[in-house]
Amino acid sequence: MSSANHEVRAGFKLRVAALLGDIVAASENMRVAIVEAGGGKVVGLLLETMAVPKEENVRQAESARALAYLIANVNVNKAVFARSGAVPNLLRFIFFAQPRRSKEVSAFKGCHRRFTGTNSDGF
C-alpha cells in the first residue's frame, strides 16, 4: 500500500510542477503571484526540486522550466535570487545538468585518431 501512495504522491508532485510551469509561462501577473505565494515558499519548493540530481526526472525539468520563466522576468528575478539557497541550488542544477561524455565515446575518438592519423575535426 505504501508503494501505491508513493506513486500517487510522485504523480501529484509532477502535475503541480507542470502546472506551476504553465502558470508562470502565462503572464506577468501570474509570475508575480507565484513568487509572492506562501511568502516565497512556492519558489523555495521549485528551487529544492530543481536542485535534486536525478536522471530523467520530469519533475525536476518542470521546476527548472518554471524557474527559467521567473529568472528571465526582470520584475521578479530579484525575489527568486533573494531566496535562501537559490544560487547554490541553481549552480547545483547547472552542474548536474551538464551532459557527461562517456568513456566509450572518448575511447572511440582516440582510436579514430590512431587509425587515420587525424582527429575527428580532420586535422
Image (cartoon, rainbow, N blue to C red):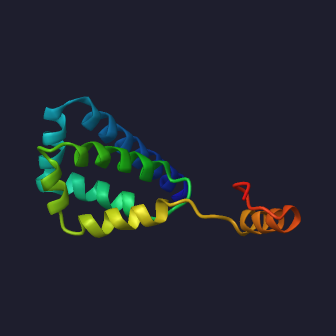
Question: Would residue 91 appear left or right of 122 to someone viewing this image?
Answer: left
Residue 104 placement (x, y as % from top left): 76, 66
Q: Is residue 122 above or below residue 87?
A: above
* Farthest residue, direction right: 115
- Quarter of the image where one finds residue 118: bottom right
Residue found at x 38% / y 40%: 18
Q: Quadrant of residue 116?
A: bottom right
Vertical placement of residue 104 versus 24, above or below: below
Q: Residue at x 14, y 62 (%)?
A: 82
In this image, 33 relative to 6: left or right?
left
Q: What is the residue that sits farthest to the front in this orientation?
A: 123
Check the image and report above or below for 15 versus 118: above
Identify which residue is drawn at 20% across, 30% down. 27
In the rendered structure, the answer to whether residue 104 lies left or right of residue 79 reads right
Dividing the picture into quadrants, the one containing residue 1 is bottom right
**Image coords of residue 54 (percent x, y):** 51, 62
| Residue 46 spot, x, y in % from top left | 30, 54
Q: Quadrant of the C terminus?
A: bottom right
Q: Residue furthest top?
A: 26
Residue occupying the point 40% across, 62% down? 93
Residue 101 spot, x, y in % from top left: 63, 64
